[in-house]
Amino acid sequence: MKPRFSRSLVLFALIIIGISASFAQTAPDPEKFASVKIINFGQMDDRYFRGGQPLPGDYQTLKDLGVNTVIDLRNDPTEYEKREVEALGMKYVNIPMSGWKWAKDDQVEEFLKVVNHPETGVVYAHCKAGRHRAGLIGAIYRFEKYGWDYDKVYQEMKNYNYSSWPWHHNIKSFVRDYAKRNKDSISAVASSVAALAN
C-alpha cells in the first residue's frame, strides 16, 4: 500500500512540475534566439513572440521562426514595416498605442480579436523597445489565456526590462487594474455557477 502511494505521489508531483513549467515566466533568451537581432526579443508560448522594433532585414528571421502576423503597437509606425511584412507573405496589423497612457478598451478588444482569430497563426507583437506597450499587451495575453495573477505578470514584464520610472507608471497601474477586474469577473462567474448548482 505504501509503495503504491509513494509512486502515485511522485507521479502527481512530476505532473504538477510539468504543468508549472509550461506556464513559466519568460525572459529574453539570447542563446535560444542567437540569429535574432531584434532588441528585447522573446517567446511567450508556441504562438506568441514579443520584442522591440524590427529593422528591415529582421522580417525574414521572423518568417523563418514561423511568424504569420506582425502586430505593431507603435503610434508612429515606421515607413517600411507594412511593406516588408506583406512582401514576405505575413499579415501586418497596426494597433497604435501610447507608451504613457492606459490602453483603451477598443485597443484591447482589437488585440484580443486578432490574437484569438484562428487565421492569425503565430504572432510577433512589438513596440519600439519591447518594454512598455509590448509588456502591457503581453500582460493582457497572460491574463486572458493563462489566468495569471498580477504579481506573476508584473515579474515577467520586469524580465523584459519594464520600468515604470519616470513616465510609464500608467502602464503598471493599467495592468494592476486589469488584473483586479479580471479577478473580480472570474469570482462573479464562479459565484453564479455555485448559485445555480444549489
Image: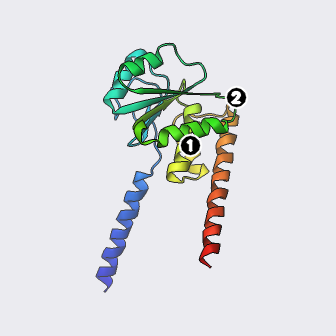
Quarter of the image with the C terminus is bottom right
Checking the image for residue 101, the label placed there is none
Mark 2 or 1: the one toward you: 1
* Closer to us: 95 or 22: 95
Q: Quadrant of the N terminus?
A: bottom left
Q: Return the disc, 2 or 1, that comes first in the chain's sequence.
A: 1
Q: Which residue was labeled with disc 2?
A: 167
Seen from the viewer's position, the closer of residues 17 and 143 is 143
**Mark 1 element type:** helix
Residue type, numbered disc 1: Ala
Q: Residue furthest top?
A: 79
- Name the residue carrying label 1: 139
Residue 184 sits in quarter: bottom right
Q: CA distance from mark 2 to mark 1?
A: 19 Å
Local secondary structure at mark 2: loop
Residue 174, position as x, y percentages in the image:
68, 41
Inspect the image, locate mark 2, and give the three-letter code of the amino acid beneath it.
Answer: Trp
Residue drawn at (33%, 32%), measured in percent from left and top? 65
Residue pictured at 43% horizontal, 24% vertical: 38
Q: How many marks?
A: 2
Choose top left, top right, bottom left or bottom right for residue 75: top right
Give the class, few, some or many, for how many residues have Cα within 10 Å of label 2's Cα (few <14, many ≥20): few
Which residue is drawn at the image coordinates 39% and 37% (left, top)? 122
